[in-house]
Image (cartoon, rainbow, N blue to C red):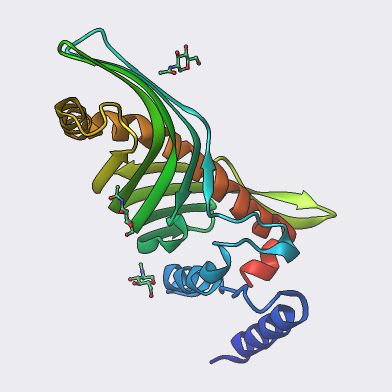
Amino acid sequence: MEIYQVVVAISAFFTATALLPEYIHVCNARDPELPKCINNSINHLRPRFQSGIKDLEVPPLEPLKLNEIKLRRGPSAVALDCNITNFKVWGPSSFVITDLKVNLDKNIFVFKTIIPHLYFKGNYNLNMNILLINVRGRGPIEGNCTNYGSEVVMKGRKILINNEEHLKFDKIRLRLSIGKSKIVLGNLPGGDSILREVTDSLVNDNSDLFINEIKPTLERGLAEKFTEIANKITLRFTYKELFA
Ligand SMILES: *[C@@H]1O[C@H](CO)[C@@H](O)[C@H](O)[C@H]1NC(C)=O
Ligand SMILES: *[C@@H]1O[C@H](CO)[C@@H](O)[C@H](O)[C@H]1NC(C)=O
Ligand SMILES: *[C@@H]1O[C@H](CO)[C@@H](O)[C@H](O)[C@H]1NC(C)=O
């Protein structure tokens, strides 16, 4: 190590210990393995995502509350009218970063991640026509998604607050790729009858319809929440503190 680097390392250490809480790990902007360092910092912070970080006013990531979802399809072989309310998702904080490209000069971070498991539930209100059968009902909806991939693009810019540079992110762009998913609508009409069996299998056979409608709302919800969390952290600390 050259003396310069030692000084930088020591001053980074003191900056970090003096001003940053223990759960924020600093990365050196000149670190040749910067993506790895950022990954480690995020892993270190991860246990706090779920319930939020009070000191920094970072809101809890779970459960993630989504806006009402309105599905409408038809007229076709399957005409569907379904509203989902009180929709909550657990699991997004378990994401694993599989690839990260950083361009610090342009403040661009491109993440590829896998979300091993998402669990969601809400309430549905359904009116569906499949072939000649009309299915109406309301009740709980729940489902699991496993191994969803996601690509996340974070683009920021440096802004001045009190004459200090901070990194502020624009709205994060997030795309989910489909993994495996399973959805169950509880309380479908028909009781124990054959009608019930028919509606069950019709809904299950068409669960892609539901997932395809839920996905954009989920992407938007996740993108908004991640933008909020990232900015709570990067606006609280100066650029120099975070990337010593
Ligand atoms: C990030 O860290 C996780 C957990 O240690 C690891 O599984 C993953 O491979 C790492 N990703 C990269 C891009 O280094
Ligand atoms: C869904 O909500 C819309 C209004 O936002 C309403 O017109 C429609 O009847 C609702 N669908 C069901 C199945 O309740
Ligand atoms: C989702 O997963 C949970 C726990 O792994 C399980 O209890 C539940 O029955 C699953 N629901 C569906 C619809 O697969």
Quadrant in the picture for residue 143: top left
139 w.r.t. 181: above or below: above
Q: Is residue 78 left or right of residue 45?
A: left
Residue 13 sits in which quadrant? Answer: bottom right
State the image coordinates of residue 192 (x, y, percent, origin top left).
21, 34
Give the quadrant of the C terminus. Answer: bottom right
Asked whether residue 178 appears in the rendered view, the answer is no
Residue drawn at 27 percent across, 11 percent down: 74
**Percent x, y of residue 48:** 58, 67
Residue 145 drawn at (x, y percent) = 30, 49
Q: Nearer the viewer, residue 68 or 20?
A: 68
Residue 119 horizontal/vertical position (percent): 38, 51
**Front residue of this view, candidates 85 and 140:** 140
Q: Nearer the viewer, residue 144 or 126?
A: 126
| Residue 8 occupies quadrant | bottom right
Query: Which residue shows up at 15% across the image and 13% down it?
Result: 131
Q: Nearer the viewer, residue 139 or 228?
A: 139
Single out the residue that lies furthest toward the right: 162
Q: Is residue 228 above or below residue 11?
A: above
Asked if residue 140 can be seen in this view, the reply is yes
Query: Ligand 1 lies in which image quarter?
Result: bottom left
